[in-house]
Image (cartoon, rainbow, N blue to C red):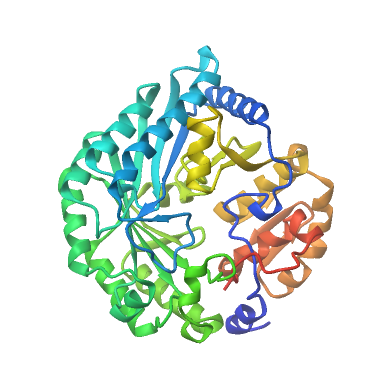
Amino acid sequence: MNSKVELLRKYNVAGPRYTSYPTVPYWDHSPTTEQWIDSLIREMREGHKRNEAAALYVHIPFCQSLCTYCGCNTRITRNRSVGKPYVETVLKEWNLYLEKIPADLKPIQLSELHLGGGTPTFLTVEELQTLIKGLLVHCKVSDDHEWSLEADPRVTSHEHLKALRELGFTRLSLGIQDFDSKVQEAVHRIQTVEQVAEIVKDARNMGYNSINFDLIYGLPFQNLEGVRATIEAVEKQRPDRIAFYGYAHVPWIKPGHLRYSDDDIPSGEAKRALYELGRELLEKAGYREVGMDHFALESDSLWKASVDGQLHRNFMGYTSRRVTPQFGLGVSAIGDSWSAFAQNEKLLETYAERINEKNELPIHRGHVLNAEDLVLRTHILNLMTRFETNWKDPALQTPFLKEIPARLTELVKDGLVIVGDESCQVTTLGQALIRNICMAFDARLQRKIPDAQLFSKTV
């Protein structure tokens, strides 16, 4: 059997992160507005049967400066006057949805609300209050609701946290990435441990009961010593969750990545060594690995969901429960009705024009899942959240699955999976290469290998 280092080298290929299936480059059947709305309504009705409520994701694109590692859709500006009209446009978009939802499904049952970006706290306190109150006035909020936001410690104030807490927010995700000054300078994200500690202390005192830190390994000039120092500083803050992502170097998609060369970026075994060190230190500090790239304290709902088999994964990463449908509001936001995806216009001006001047939902592209897509989506989700799946149930079968044992032969030989006639179980060794394993279940990828590199490397 190959050593772990040899396996990492062997399987270090470009591959999706599987926040959706099919993955975005393979979307080939965009829904019409009517199809999209119909799929949302169907899923809302199914959700009522399962006693599940809907989710809202709102994308705030504005940032006052560019973090060059970022892969999100952002608008860099210091012009604060853009906030108010953007909030008004998002609320108009929400009203367009409400006009199309049948009366018997209103007020909309809502259990999750997430503000992402960009930088949500780029908006003023007043703008955030207007946004949230405008969204919730038409909703019935579940007793177990969770409101969460992403925040930049450099621009998030006491007043921001206080206002959002009063609006019901209890989860806060802070973009940390790395505390090494050389790395911070390279990626244009300079913030101190003291700044972060002050935000955490403030949030805890206000009653935020779950704090997440986003960390990235594989950034330019990152080394083992720096990762150790960053993790040690993070441990002292004791966040409930930690997302420890691998940097996805895609300069052909994100021009900001051209600010440093390939020689500046740890890759392959060197990159994986950063992760292994970080994982070791986090586990010693009491964090438990959850799925791929995520860690949580045993007291956190993400770990409990992992143990109970309730873990879910979507465009926002891992969540402690399945919540569908998800309405995506704001420029480039993605909605998910389980049977379809819809992404808004990526250009801010086009997004606003379609809502304000054409009075239409600003859907740019999406995908209606066919019968095979729906089955394979379930299996890939199972692998990403439970490290196992089976297709004994006729409802979880599709002809492509007959090819799976043959496609996994090499992975079985390398000790990454255990495969039965109708099942696949990921071994402890294979968990580090879960993206590669999911690729074997990706019928669209297997049938059409991309001509150009679309994805980051899996290691």
Residue 317 coordinates in the image, percent (x, y): 49, 52
- For the residue pair 332 and 444, the one nearer the viewer reads as 332
Looking at the picture, does residue 155 appear above or below residue 193?
A: above
Is residue 74 visible to us here? yes
- Residue at 71% across, 68% down: 452
Looking at the picture, does residue 402 appear above or below residue 368?
A: below
- Residue at 53% across, 66% down: 254
- For the residue pair 252 and 151, the one nearer the viewer reads as 252
- For the residue pair 235 and 248, the one nearer the viewer reads as 248
Is residue 327 visible to us here? no
Which quadrant does the C terminus fall into?
Answer: bottom right
Which quadrant does the N terminus fall into?
Answer: bottom right
The quarter of the picture where residue 281 lies is bottom left
Report the side of 80 relative to 28 (left or right): left
User: How many numbered marks appear?
Assistant: 0
Residue 74 coordinates in the image, percent (x, y): 44, 55
- For the residue pair 409 and 48, the one nearer the viewer reads as 48
- Residue at 50% across, 82% down: 261
Report the side of 15 relative to 303 (left or right): right
- Residue at 74% across, 64% down: 450
State the residue lying farthest toward the bottom: 263
Residue 335 coordinates in the image, percent (x, y): 55, 39
Report the side of 53 relative to 381 (left or right): left
State the residue lying farthest toward the front: 357
